[in-house]
Image (cartoon, helix red, strand yellow):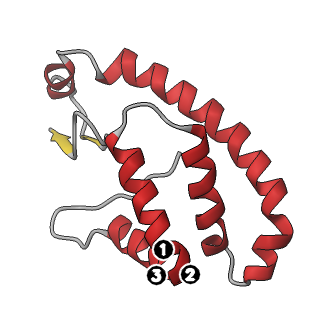
Amino acid sequence: MSCVVRLEGQPDRHEQYRQARLARIPELARDRYLRLRRRRDRHSTLDPAVEAELRRIGLPTDFARPRAAAEWADELEAEIVAVNHEVNRELGVDFERYYAAPDTGRRLGQLTVPCCSFIATPIRDRWTR
């Protein structure tokens, strides 16, 4: 799991990362990538075909040399799929257990130590104590 911490008043580094990554996607594939992202964001369940295509389009952005991405694409795809599946399964279980409960805000508010919770939905950038 990755996390980008942003304190109040600081620039949104995650959005900067996303924009820089998008700019590295070849122009011919960029529109398709954005359409797939919007499609994925509209649905609550993941479509494996959409996820695979997003990974294939985005993978070269993680490399300084496009040829390196092409050389490693199959191996990285297999590894990413295995790891992401397991991580997403665990995160889904944790989300249901810890964050989907109606009393999450109250429980976070009762913490006696500083805590910052970053969850896409339904809690977003919720600070406590």
Q: Residues within 10 Å of mark 3 (few under 14, many from 20)?
A: few
Q: Residue at (83%, 65%) from the top-left corner?
A: 72
Q: Which mark is residue 30?
A: 1
Read off the residue under disc 2.
Answer: 26
Residue that appears at 35% across and 58% down = 5
- Eyeballing the image, is 32 above or below 101? below
Q: Report the Cα–Cα distance between label 2 and label 1.
A: 6 Å
Question: Disc 3 designates what residue?
Answer: 23
Asked where in the image residue 107 lies, by quadrant, the reply is top left
The C terminus lies in which quarter of the figure?
Answer: top left
> Residue 92 appears at what percent x and percent y?
46, 25
Q: Nearer the viewer, residue 52 or 60?
A: 52
Q: Nearer the viewer, mark 1 or mark 3?
A: 1
The reply, left or right, for residue 106 in relation to residue 111 is left
Sequence order check, earlier mark of 1 and 3: 3
- Note whether 98 is above or below 11 in the view shown: above
Whether residue 61 sits left or right of residue 81 in the image: it is left
Compared across the picture, whether 45 is left or right of 85 comes to left
Type of amino acid at the residue the image marks with label 3? Ala
Number of other residues with Cα within 10 Å of mark 1, as a class: few under 14, some 14 to 19, many 20 or more: some
Q: Residue at x 41, y 64 (%)?
A: 34
Q: Position of residue 91 (x, y in %)?
A: 49, 29
Task: Say whether residue 25 is visible.
Answer: no
Q: Are marks 3 and 2 in contact (CB under 8 Å)?
A: no
Characterize the local packing of mark 2: few (<14), some (14-19) or many (20 or more) Cα atoms within 10 angstroms. Answer: some
Counting the numbered discs, the total is: 3
Q: Which element type, helix, strand or loop, lies under badge 1?
A: helix
